[in-house]
C-alpha cells in the first residue's frame, strides 16, 4: 500500500495487529490489507529461575504488552501523523506449553511454569505410556499431572489451566479458548475433529480420578478453535489493558490465540503437507507437516498440528542461541573496554561472518549450549561448556563456527529420526534471530539438516507477523477458503524467499562435528553431576 492507502487503512480500522510473547522479546506488528508490516514495537524480557522453576511474572506480561503497543502506536503517529483508534482484527501468540493455573476467581495459584522447565519427567513418562502417545515434559498436561503426583495443595482450588497466549486472550476478550496448534501443545489432538482426542481424554480422566481428581478436561483446559474461526472481541477492559491511553476502541474481532509453532508455520507458508519450517531463537524447533502418521512413538518427536489442524511432527530443543548471545555480549564488553563502539547488530553480523571463514569441521573445537535441560539428549539440567584439545585450531572463525554448530546440533539429532521414518520435505523455511545475518545461519542450518533452507525478507518479523496474518485471515478470507490457499495465493503469491542448498563440504564438516558432539555428551553429563 502507498502512504495515502496506509493512512486510510489506519483511520478506517483496516489494519491487523499481531503480538507474540517470545522467550526474550515481546513483539507487536501492525500490517495492512496487503500483509506488509506498517509498524512494530517490542519489549525485552527474560525468564527467571525462582525456587527451582523457570518463570515470568505476570505483571511483566502486561508491562511488556503495553510497552510494545506504545512503541508501535508512537511509530504510526510519527510516520503517518495519526493515532490508532480502531483495528480490523488482532491476535496473540506466545511460547507454547507450560502451566498457568487459576482458581474460580481468576487468581493465579502458582507462578507461571514455562516450557523451559524439565521438572515433569515422571508425569511425562506415565502419560506417554498410558496414552501411547509422546507427551513431552513441556506440555501443559504433563505439568498438571506432575502437580498431582507431587500432591500440590493448589489443585484443590484449580478451576482453569491455560497457556501464555491463552491467558492474554482470555483477559482481553473474556473467552477461554486457544487455537488448535496451541492446544496440541497442551494435550493430544484428533486432527479429524480438531479437538482434544476423546479416547485419550477419557483415559486421562480415569487416571486422575484414581487419585481423587474428578476433572473434566474439556472445561479445565481452553476450548479449541481452528484458524479463521471467531474467537471473541476486544472488550473495553481488554482495550485498556492493551492501550492505557484510552484511544483504542473496543470491539475488534480476535483470531484464536496460537503458539509460536503455529505462527512460525504461518509466517513461513509451511502449513501444507511436505512443507516445514525451522524457528531458531532462544529455543529451536523444526516442524514437518506429515503426509502420513509416524510408524511408532518417539520420545524425541512432538506430534502437534498446524493452525488448521493438520498433523505435524516437531523436534523441539530447549537451547539454541542463549549461549551464543552470551559470547557475543562478552565480545561487546571487550569492544567497550577498548574505548570503541559497536551496535549489537554490528557485533552479531561481524562475528557471524567470521564463522564462514572457519574450517568446515570447526577445527576440532567443541561446545555445548545447554543453559537449561535438554530432553532430546536426556538432560534435566544443563551447563554451557566450551572445550578444545591441545591440537585443535583455536581461532575466532573456528570459535564462531563451533558456537553456530552447537546451536543446531541437538536439533539434527532429533531430525535424524524423521529421516528414518521416511518423512519427505521439499525444503525448510527458516525464521528467528539465528537467520538475521544474511546467509550465515541459513547456510549452517542447511548443512546441519541436509535439506535446502529458504529465508524470506519477513524472517526477522517471525511469529508476531505470523499471528497478524492469522488475524488478517479471520477478517479477509473468502467463504470456504482454507488457510493453505489464503497464505499461498494472497500472502506469499509464489514467493519462496532466498533458498540455499546444503554445501557438500559444509555438510561433511558439520557431520564430523556432530560425531564429536555426540561422543562428548558424557562430558556434559559429568559437568551437570559434578558442578552447581
Image (cartoon, helix red, strand yellow):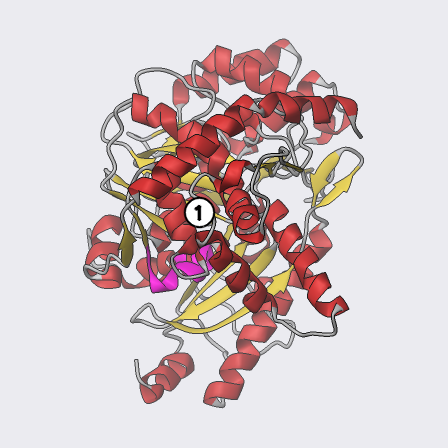
Image mark count: 1
**465 drawn magenta:** yes
Q: Position of residue 361 (x, y in %)?
A: 45, 38
In the displayed structure image, the side of residue 202 where residue 14 appears, left or right: left
What span is in magenta? 455-466
Q: Which quarter of the figure has residue 495?
A: bottom left
Label 1 secondary element? strand
**In front: 487, or 437?**
437
Q: Position of residue 148 (x, y in %)?
A: 68, 20
Which secondary structure class fits the magenta region best? helix
Q: Which quarter of the figure has residue 110?
A: top right
Q: Which residue is mark 1?
A: 279
Residue at 28% in and 59% down: 497
Q: Is residue 434 visible?
A: yes
**403 drawn magenta:** no
Residue at 51% in and 63% down: 349
In the displayed structure image, the side of residue 133 where residue 382 appears, left or right: right
In the displayed structure image, the side of residue 197 where residue 388 appears, left or right: right
Q: Is residue 306 visible?
A: no
- Seen in the picture, residue 268 relative to 342 is either above or below; the reply is above
**In front: 2, or 288?**
288
Q: Position of residue 502 (x, y in %)?
A: 30, 44
**In front: 502, or 478?**
502
Q: Position of residue 468 (x, y in %)?
A: 41, 61
- Seen in the picture, residue 82 relative to 438 is either above or below; the reply is below
Q: Which quarter of the figure has residue 293?
A: top left
Amino acid at each position: 500500500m502507498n502512504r495515502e492507502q496506509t493512512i486510510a487503512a489506519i483511520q478506517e480500522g483496516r489494519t491487523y495487529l499481531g503480538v507474540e510473547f517470545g522467550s526474550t522479546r515481546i513483539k507487536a506488528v501492525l500490517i495492512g490489507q496487503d500483509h506488509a508490516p506498517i509498524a512494530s514495537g517490542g519489549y525485552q524480557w527474560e525468564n527467571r529461575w525462582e525456587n527451582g522453576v523457570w518463570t515470568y511474572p505476570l505483571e511483566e506480561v502486561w508491562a511488556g504488552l503495553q510497552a510494545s503497543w506504545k512503541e508501535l502506536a508512537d511509530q504510526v503517529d510519527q510516520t503517518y501523523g495519526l493515532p490508532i483508534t480502531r483495528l480490523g482484527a488482532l491476535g496473540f501468540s506466545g511460547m507454547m506449553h507450560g502451566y498457568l493455573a487459576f482458581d474460580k476467581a481468576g487468581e493465579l495459584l502458582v507462578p507461571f511454569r514455562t516450557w523451559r522447565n524439565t521438572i515433569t519427567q515422571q508425569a511425562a513418562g506415565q502419560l506417554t505410556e498410558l496414552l501411547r502417545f509422546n507427551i513431552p515434559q513441556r506440555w501443559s498436561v504433563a505439568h498438571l499431572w506432575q502437580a498431582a503426583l507431587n500432591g500440590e495443595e493448589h489443585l484443590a482450588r484449580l478451576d482453569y489451566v491455560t497457556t501464555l497466549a491463552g491467558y492474554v486472550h482470555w483477559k482481553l476478550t473474556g473467552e477461554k479458548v486457544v487455537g488448535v496448534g496451541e492446544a496440541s501443545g497442551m494435550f493430544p489432538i484428533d486432527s479429524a475433529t480438531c479437538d482434544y482426542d476423546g479416547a485419550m481424554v477419557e483415559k486421562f480422566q480415569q487416571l486422575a480420578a484414581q487419585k481423587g481428581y474428578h476433572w473434566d478436561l474439556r472445561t479445565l483446559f481452553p476450548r479449541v478453535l481452528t484458524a479463521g474461526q471467531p474467537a471473541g472481541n476486544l472488550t473495553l477492559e481488554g482495550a485498556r489493558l492493551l492501550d492505557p491511553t484510552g484511544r483504542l476502541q473496543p470491539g475488534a474481532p480476535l483470531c484464536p490465540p496460537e503458539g509460536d509453532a503455529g505462527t512460525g508455520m504461518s509466517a513461513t507458508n509451511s502449513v501444507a503437507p511436505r512443507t516445514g519450517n525451522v524457528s531458531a531463537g532462544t529455543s529451536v524447533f523444526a516442524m514437518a507437516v506429515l503426509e502420513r502418521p509416524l510408524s511408532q512413538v518417539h520420545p524425541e518427536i512432538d506430534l502437534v498440528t498446524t493452525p488448521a489442524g493438520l498433523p505435524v511432527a516437531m523436534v523441539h530443543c530447549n537451547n539454541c542461541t542463549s549461549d551464543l548471545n552470551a559470547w557475543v555480549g562478552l565480545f561487546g564488553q571487550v569492544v567497550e573496554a577498548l574505548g570503541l563502539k559497536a551496535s549489537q547488530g554490528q557485533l552479531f553480523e561481524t562475528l557471524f561472518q567470521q564463522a564462514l571463514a572457519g574450517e568446515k569441521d570447526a577445527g576440532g573445537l567443541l561446545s555445548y549450549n545447554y543453559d537449561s535441560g535438554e530432553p532430546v539428549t536426556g538432560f534435566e539440567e544443563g551447563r554451557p561448556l566450551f572445550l578444545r584439545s591441545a591440537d585443535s585450531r583455536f581461532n575466532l572463525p573456528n570459535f564462531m563456527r563451533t558456537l553456530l554448530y552447537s546451536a543446531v546440533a541437538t536439533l539434527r539429532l532429533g531430525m535424524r529420526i524423521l529421516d528414518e521414518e521416511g518423512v519427505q520435505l521439499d525444503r525448510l523455511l527458516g525464521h528467528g534471530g539465528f537467520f538475521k545475518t544474511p546467509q550465515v545461519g541459513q547456510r549452517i542450518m542447511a548443512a546441519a539438516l541436509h535439506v535446502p533452507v529458504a529465508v524470506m525478507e519477513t524472517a526477522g518479523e517471525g511469529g508476531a507477523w505470523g499471528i497478524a496474518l492469522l488475524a488478517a485471515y479471520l477478517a479477509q478470507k473468502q467463504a470456504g477458503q482454507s488457510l493453505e490457499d489464503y497464505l499461498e495465493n494472497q500472502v506469499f503469491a509464489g514467493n519462496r524467499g532466498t533458498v540455499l542448498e546444503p554445501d557438500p563440504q559444509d555438510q561433511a564438516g558439520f557431520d564430523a562435528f556432530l560425531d564429536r558432539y555426540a561422543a562428548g555428551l558424557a562430558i556434559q553429563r559429568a559437568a551437570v553431576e559434578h558442578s552447581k
